Amino acid sequence: MDDTLRVLNTDVLVAGGGPCGLMLANELGRRGIRTLLVDAKPSTAFNPQANATQARTMEHFRRLGFADEVRALGLPPDHPTDIAYFTRYTGHELARLSLPTAAQAVRDVKKLGGSWSAAELPHRVSQKFVEQVLRRHAETHATNDIRYGCELLDFEDAGGHVEARIRAIDGGAPQRVRARFLVGADGPRSLVRSRLGLAWSGATGVRRDFMGGLMFAVYLRAPAFYDVLPHARAWMYVSVNAQRRAFMASVDGRSEFAFHAALHEGENAQAWTEADARRVFAQALGREIPIEILSCGTWTAGHSLVAGAFQRGRVFLAGDAAHLFTPTGGLGYNTAVEDAVNLAWKLGQVLRGTSPMSLLDSYELERKPLALRNTAYARRFADSVGLYPALPVLEEESPDGIAARAAASAHLQQHVRLEFNIPGVTFGGRYDGSPLVVDDGTRPPPDTPNDYVPTACPGGRPPHAWLEDGRSLFDSFHDEWTLLALGPAAVDAQPFTDAARALGLDLRVVRHPSASLRALYEAPLALVRPDQVVAWRGDDAAAAGDVLRQASGHAVLR
């Protein structure tokens, strides 16, 4: 490092200004942690990219105070959010999963129970809009320094801190940065992961007819699309035919769409022009209409990759730098947000001096198994749709064609529920075996994608309920540590308050006398971490000191 450069000091240097990096900045900023975020892009994303915000992510946005702001973006409030499959968009409809509009989601969420008992339902909104909200809120925190158009050049873990150099894209001298920690949230071609020498493990180069191999992406404007669509509107439109398989998500519910087409062997989409984009779009639509090309490019489906490690000393990986998905199920962006939520509270504890450095070892221990789990689910979803053959007979107006469409309908109707009705994936991620989780001897329900059984078994999301005053139970949680005291019998929680004060933990006792909540949690006391994960539950507070020491990383991590 060039010692002649003026040094900029910060607590956390974040490389990458996508959803993961911006979520980190929000979580750290509200804790008063000095955070410098750099991203070589001139601003947040222009292209639509991810288009599905899962319910658990929306619950985190609610916790931070901007879920309503996110839900107001994207599709109009009364626009359907269905996923529908067609031979071509103007051809035969094969399958459809009907889902609530944004307006219906707000009304319906309080009526749902079981697998979908939640503070928030999913929302169909382009990542480009979400990033704008995340950036706007990140910039409100006085301790945050958000710099787009600025790249990370290099870094070195010096033991007690990280030395790095950054530089504005439009020129100028490099800036030297000294940070307590560095987080590489810098995407699949991560400079941070590369410099750490961390290789991918998992599957790549998987070939499928669809969602496996090179894909051609077009961000387009097609005002006439709804005029020629002979079917009910949807949010996602999938074409299943032998000529061109593709999917398309509505970006604004009016004229903008994110269109992605699978390529055939021998096609060189990197050389394609706007005329080719119009041709390929017409193949999926089934006719030609005027379209405006806003951008186009290629990307590769068929990845289910996880980095060999998520941490080296004071340097961490998160988001697409740590795990790379085929986007079936929309799991990449949502897993990245959970990475940020998990890492941020731990960095906050260590930087505030309320937990030892060893707490940070739990980040990889907790998040890497979830990355392996979620990439495996995404691969399963991709296999389900991408390995199903789209034969020419599907479009024949003949008895054979009718039979083929009936068989395709049966398969795709089953598939669409497998991929898009996934409360088990959304809410069922767990940190079983984590040294921060106090095992109570119980075991959680099986991990399945399409069913979720609420459980307060330590290590997972707290069971949700709506309170008599109309609030979500989650709304009553403290920003940091929460001790839930449940049921009509008042259990003495003072030992937790005393132990938290001794450890310097920001803990609040939240009492709810409801007998139904006591039954839901199967215990009168439950400790909820800052990332809204149950760390412990029990019948009394006798072991409060030991529980809090373990949950906050003061116990030796195994």
Image (cartoon, rainbow, N blue to C red):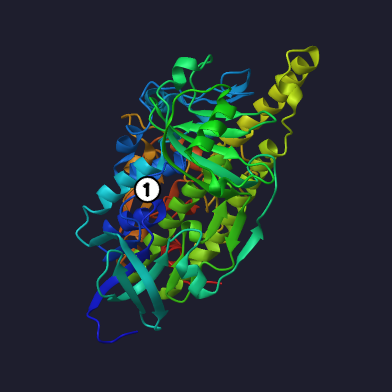
Q: Is 505 placed left or right of 233 in the picture?
A: left
* Residue 317, visible in the rendered structure: yes
The residue that mark 1 highlights is 45
Q: Is residue 184 left or right of residue 64?
A: right
Picture mark count: 1
**Depth check: 130 or 444 in front?**
130
- Identified at 24% across, 62% down, the residue is 145
Q: Residue at x 35, y 61 (%)?
A: 40
Which residue shows up at 61% across the image and 30% down it? 417
Q: Position of residue 69 (x, y in %)?
A: 29, 37
Is residue 493 in sight in this rendering?
no
Q: Is residue 451 left or right of residue 39?
A: right
Disc 1 crowd, CA 10 A, few/some/many (<14, 14-19, 20+): some
| Residue 185, image quadrant | bottom left
Asked if 85 appears above or below 6 in the picture, the reply is: above
Image position, residue 84 (x, y; %) = 57, 25
Q: Which of these two is toward me, 390 or 482?
A: 390
Q: Quadrant of the C terminus?
A: bottom right
Residue visible at 38% across and 52% down in the picture: 483
**Image coords of residue 280 (percent x, y):** 56, 33
